Image (tube, rainbow, N blue to C red):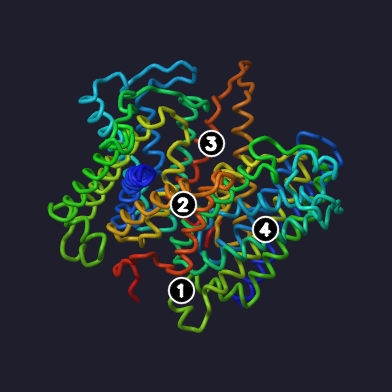
C-alpha cells in the first residue's frame, strides 16, 4: 500500500512536470510549426536568472534574493521576454521557411544559448537554495511520507495545465491560437492576423518554461548550463508519442513518459536501474513502431494535397 | 545538354575539392608540421562525418541528429577490436571473449566500426524511417540520447564516464584522406543511383514520389543504413587517430558542428557539404585560436571560452535566415 501510494505521487509529480514542457512544445509546433529545441534553454535561462552572472564558484543571488511574491512574476516576465525576443530575432525572419529549417534554427539557437550560459557563468555546476523548506516531508494519512514540494509540483502543474487549457478553449486569443494551429491557411483567409497569435504562443511557452525553471531549481538546487536538455528531450518524446499537433495528446504523452519513467525506476531490478532512461526510449520506440503518428494523431496535421 | 552539364558538375566539383584537399594533405605531410597535420586530420574525420550526414539528410531532406551516435558506435567498435587484449581485460571487463581476444589490422577494424554502426542504423531505421519528417528528426534525437546514456552507463564496455586509453594510434593524414575519398565515392555512387534519385524525388515532393510508386520508407532506410556505415567509419578513424576515447566527445557539440557544416555549405549537394566543412573548420579553428589568445598590435587578446561556440551558433542562424539553402545551395 505504502509503495503504491508513493509510486502514485511520484508518477503524478514527474508526469505533470513533463506535461508542462510537452504542452509548451506542442503549442509552438501547432501554432508556428516550430519544433523548439531551445525550450530547454529557456528553462535554463530562467533558472540562471536567479543568480548574478559570474564564473566564480561563489554564488550571489540575483532574482533569487527576492521574496516569492516578487520572484515568481519577475522570473516569469524574464523568460517570456527571452521567448519573445527569440521569436522576433530568429523565428519571425524564418516564418515562410519549411518546418525542418525552423527546427535546425532552434537547434542552433539552443546551442548558442547554452554556450552563452557557459560564457557568463562558467561550466561548473552551481548550487542554490531556493525555498528549501519545501523539501520537508509531510505524512499523508499516515500511509506515505511525501515531500511538500511534490505536492506543490502536482498542484502547480495541474493548476497551470487547467489554466492554459481554459485559455486555449475559452479566451479569444486561445481560440485564435487553436484556429491557427488547426488550419493556418483558412485562419489567415478569415482575417486572423498571424503575428499577435504567434507572439501570444511564444509568451505562453515562455511562461510554462519559467514554471519549469522554478520547480526544477527548488527540487534539485543545482544549476548546470545544460540542465534543460534532458527535460526537453522527454517533453519532445511526450509530444511525438501523444501525436504532433494535438495539444491534449501532448499533455497526455508528457504525462505518460513521466509515468513510465517512475514505474521503471520503481520496478526495474537494481542492476538495470542505471539504464532506466534507455528503457524509456525503448518503450517510446515500440510505441512509435506500432503507431508512427503517435497515440492520438491530430487530423489537422496531415498535409492536404 | 544542361542536364548533362549538371551531372558533370555534380561529379567534377567534389572531385576538384578532393584534389585540393589531397594537395594540402600532401604538402603538410612533406613539411611535417605536426600541429597543422593534427588539425588537418581532425577536419578530414569531420568531413567523413558530414558526407555521411549528406547521404541521408541531403538526399532525403529529413534532418537526423543521431549520426554522431553512430560515429560513437563506430569509434568504440574499432577500439574493441584493436586494443591490446591485456589492456582490454583491465579496462573493459564486460567484453565477450571473442571481442576481448581480437586484435585486427586497421582496415578490418574500420570495417567492423562501419558495420556495427550500420547494423544499429538498420534496426533503428526500421522505426525512424517510417515516421513523418519532423517526427523522424525528433525520434533520431531521442535515439541519440539513448545511445549516449547507454554508452555512459555501460562502463564494462566503454570505461563509462572516464576515458578509454591505450588505443593504437595509426591514422595519418594520407590514410584519413583515403577514407575521405572512399566516403566521397560511396556518396556519389548512391547519389547517382536509381535509389538516390528516388530518394531525392521524395525530398522534393513526397506525395508525388509515393504516387509514382516509390517506397519512400524503404529508400530512406537504405540511405540511413549507408550513411550510418560512413558515420561509423568516421568514428573508427577518430578512435585510431586520437588513441583516447570519451563518450563526451560524441555529444551536442559534435552534433551541432557537423550539422552546421552541412547546412552552411548547402545540404542539397555533396559539393556544398564539402565546402561547408572546409569553411566551418576554418572559422572554428580561427575562433578556437582566438580563445587561446592572439597577438593583436603587440598585446595578447583572448576571448573567454564559449565565444567560438556562440559565434558559430550565430553563424548558422544567420545562414538559415539569409541563405537557407547554404553557401552554394541551388
**Between marks 3 and 4 in the image, the one whose residue lies nearer the viewer:** 4
Report which residue position mark 4 lands on. B117
Report which residue position mark 3 lands on. B309
Q: Which mark is residue B206?
A: 1
Residue drawn at 49 percent across, 61 percent down: A285
Locate residue B210 relative to residue B152 in the image: left or right: left
Report helix, strand or loop for mark 4.
helix
Using the rendered view, name the quadrant where residue A160 is placed. Answer: top left
Report which residue position mark 2 lands on. A104
**Mark closer to the chain start, 3 or 4:** 4
Report helix, strand or loop for mark 2.
helix
Have a look at marks 3 and 2 and say if they share a chain. no
| Residue A88, image x, y percentages | 31, 44
Is any atom of residue A21 visible in this view? no
What subunit carries mark 3? B
**Mark closer to the chain start, 4 or 1:** 4
Amino acid at each position: 500500500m505504502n509503495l503504491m501510494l508513493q509510486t502514485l505521487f511520484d508518477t503524478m509529480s514527474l508526469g505533470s512536470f513533463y506535461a508542462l514542457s510537452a504542452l509548451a512544445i506542442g503549442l509552438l509546433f501547432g501554432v508556428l510549426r516550430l519544433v523548439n529545441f531551445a525550450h530547454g534553454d529557456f528553462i535554463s535561462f530562467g533558472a540562471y536568472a536567479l543568480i548574478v552572472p559570474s564564473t566564480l564558484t561563489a554564488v550571489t543571488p540575483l532574482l533569487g534574493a527576492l521574496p516569492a511574491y516578487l520572484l515568481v512574476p519577475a522570473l516569469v516576465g524574464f523568460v517570456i521576454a527571452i521567448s519573445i525576443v527569440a521569436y522576433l530575432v530568429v523565428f519571425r525572419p524564418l516564418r515562410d521557411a519549411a518546418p525542418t529549417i525552423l527546427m535546425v534554427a532552434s537547434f542552433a539557437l539552443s546551442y548558442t544559448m547554452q554556450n552563452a550560459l557557459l560564457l557568463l557563468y562558467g561550466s561548473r555546476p552551481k548550487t542554490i537554495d531556493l525555498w528549501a523548506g519545501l523539501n520537508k516531508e509531510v505524512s499523508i494519512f499516515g500511509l506515505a511520507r511525501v515531500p511538500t514540494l511534490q505536492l506543490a509540483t502536482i498542484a502547480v502543474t495541474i493548476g497551470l495545465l487547467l489554466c492554459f487549457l481554459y485559455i486555449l478553449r475559452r479566451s479569444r486569443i486561445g481560440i485564435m491560437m487553436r484556429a491557427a494551429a488547426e488550419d493556418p491557411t483558412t485562419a489567415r483567409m478569415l482575417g486572423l492576423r498571424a503575428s499577435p497569435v504567434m507572439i501570444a504562443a511564444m509568451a505562453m511557452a515562455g511562461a510554462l518554461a519559467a514554471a519549469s525553471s522554478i520547480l526544477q531549481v527548488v527540487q534539485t538546487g543545482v544549476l548546470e548550463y545544460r540542465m534543460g536538455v534532458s527535460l526537453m528531450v522527454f517533453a519532445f518524446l511526450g509530444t511525438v508519442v501523444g501525436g504532433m499537433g494535438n495539444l491534449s495528446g501532448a499533455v497526455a504523452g508528457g504525462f505518460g513518459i513521466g509515468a513510465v519513467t517512475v514505474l521503471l525506476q520503481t520496478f526495474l531490478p537494481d542492476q538495470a536501474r542505471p539504464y532506466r532512461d534507455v528503457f524509456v526510449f525503448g518503450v517510446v520506440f515500440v510505441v512509435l513502431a506500432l503507431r508512427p503518428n503517435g497515440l492520438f494523431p491530430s487530423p489537422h496535421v496531415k498535409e492536404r494535397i | 545538354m544542361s542536364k548533362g552539364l549538371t551531372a558533370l558538375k555534380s561529379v567534377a566539383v567534389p572531385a576538384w575539392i578532393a584534389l585540393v584537399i589531397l594537395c594540402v594533405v600532401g604538402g603538410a605531410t612533406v613539411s611535417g608540421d605536426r600541429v597543422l597535420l593534427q588539425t588537418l586530420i581532425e577536419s578530414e574525420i569531420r568531413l567523413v562525418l558530414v558526407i555521411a550526414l549528406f547521404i541521408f539528410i541531403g538526399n532525403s531532406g529529413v534532418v537526423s541528429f543521431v549520426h554522431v551516435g553512430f560515429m560513437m558506435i563506430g569509434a568504440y567498435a574499432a577500439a574493441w577490436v584493436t586494443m591490446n587484449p591485456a589492456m582490454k581485460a583491465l579496462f573493459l571487463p564486460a567484453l565477450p571473449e571473442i571481442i576481448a581476444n581480437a586484435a585486427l589490422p586497421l582496415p578490418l577494424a574500420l570495417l567492423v566500426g562501419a558495420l556495427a554502426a550500420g547494423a544499429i542504423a538498420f534496426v533503428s531505421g526500421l522505426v525512424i524511417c517510417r515516421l513523418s519528417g519532423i517526427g523522424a528528426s525528433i525520434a533520431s534525437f531521442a535515439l541519440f540520447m539513448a545511445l549516449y546514456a547507454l554508452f555512459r552507463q555501460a562502463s564494462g564496455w566503454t570505461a563509462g564516464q572516464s576515458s578509454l586509453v591505450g588505443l593504437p594510434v595509426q591514422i595519418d593524414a594520407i590514410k584519413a584522406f583515403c577514407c575521405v575519398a572512399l566516403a566521397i565515392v560511396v556518396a556519389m555512387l548512391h547519389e547517382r543511383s536509381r535509389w538516390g534519385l528516388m530518394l531525392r524525388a521524395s525530398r522534393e515532393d513526397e506525395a508525388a514520389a509515393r504516387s509514382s510508386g516509390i517506397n519512400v520508407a524503404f529508400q530512406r532506410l537504405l540511405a540511413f543504413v549507408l550513411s550510418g556505415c560512413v558515420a561509423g567509419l568516421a568514428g573508427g578513424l577518430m578512435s585510431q587517430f586520437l588513441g583516447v576515447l570519451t563518450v563526451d566527445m560524441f555529444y551536442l557539440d559534435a552534433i551541432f558542428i557537423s550539422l552546421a557544416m552541412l547546412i552552411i555549405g548547402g545540404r542539397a549537394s555533396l559539393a556544398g557539404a564539402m565546402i561547408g566543412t572546409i569553411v566551418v573548420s576554418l572559422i572554428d579553428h580561427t575562433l578556437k585560436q582566438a580563445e587561446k589568445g592572439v597577438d593583436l598590435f603587440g598585446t595578447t587578446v583572448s576571448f573567454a571560452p564559449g565565444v567560438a561556440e556562440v559565434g558559430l551558433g550565430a553563424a548558422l542562424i544567420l545562414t538559415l535566415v539569409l541563405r537557407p539553402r547554404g553557401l552554394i545551395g541551388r
